[in-house]
Amino acid sequence: MNIEQHILFEDKDLLVVDKPAGLQVERDRFGHPSLEEEAQNYLEKYHRNHYLGIVHRIDRPVNGVIILAKTLSMLKDLQQQMQEEGWDKIYRGVVEGQMPNQMGKIENYLLKDPKQKKALIFDEPQPDSKQSSLRYAVLEEKNGKSLLEIQLITGRYHQIRAQLGHAGHPIVGDKLYGSNIELEGKIMLQAYSLGFTHPKTGEAMEIKVKTDLVF
């Protein structure tokens, strides 16, 4: 991976990258390639501040916007903003079948199953489950598939993938949640854009991926 080809924005405080599908965000003990390692190597190459903080994450088979902090104070500021004010996160995904409405809201209860490494979805509350909500709009339909724009109302583990799979419209390639289509190392879901306030400048930022989903 040439990380320089995936940089969406950079200043002395932030590095924003369009993470490729199939690349995990954080290092692991097995030495798998990661965005964290690629970004650290990039900073060291240009003799810059070597601090690097992971502000948030997206799933390994998903591509899209990831913010990395170059200072500890920036990491803390962004994570606090994410928790208190929320960010404007927009996803796009290609699902199997046609949605019942051109626009809609999906609400369920989600329970993380660490043994299966997946989310379980229920229509009624369960012990330890969390209410999960998202909105969607259909952008295009063809060949038995639908391109959706998705806005998270809550941010749960595998939420988009699990809720759409439970609704009978799994993300294309997401076999974990019911897709019959296999795509090597990726699924048809991307963290399309991210809106936030730059903690240092106060500027309203909106950063989107370089390449839209094609199906």
Image (cartoon, helix red, strand yellow):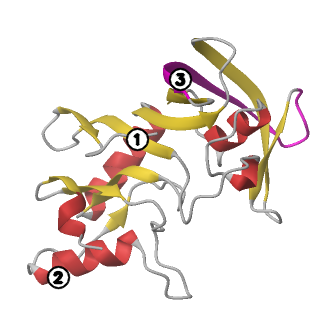
How far separated are the C-alphas under marks 1 and 3?
13 Å
Left or right of 108? Residue 207 is left
Q: Are marks 2 and 3 in contact (CB under 8 Å)?
A: no
Quadrant of residue 84 in the image? top left
Question: Which residue lies at the image location 77% right of the left edge and 28% below the top edge?
Answer: 108
Report whether 30 appears left or right of 5: right
Residue at the spot 65% in from the left edge and 23% down from the top edge: 98
Answer with mark 2 or mark 3, whichever residue precedes in sequence.
2
Three-letter code for the amino acid on which mark 1 is drawn: Leu
The answer to whether residue 66 is above or below residue 204 is: below
Q: Which label sits in the foreground, 2 or 3?
A: 3
- Name the residue beneath numbered marker 2: 44
Report crowding for label 1: few under 14, some 14 to 19, many 20 or more residues within 10 A (C-alpha). some
Q: At numbered mark 1, what does the secondary structure look like: helix, strand or loop? A: loop
- Label 3 residue SS: strand
Start and end of the magenta stretch? 124-142
Residue 170, x across and y down, in percent: 69, 39
Instruction: Look at the magenta stretch and give its main secondary structure.
Output: strand
**Front residue (pair 49, 44):** 44
Residue under pointer 3: 141
Residue at figure coordinates x 84%, y 43% from the top left: 128
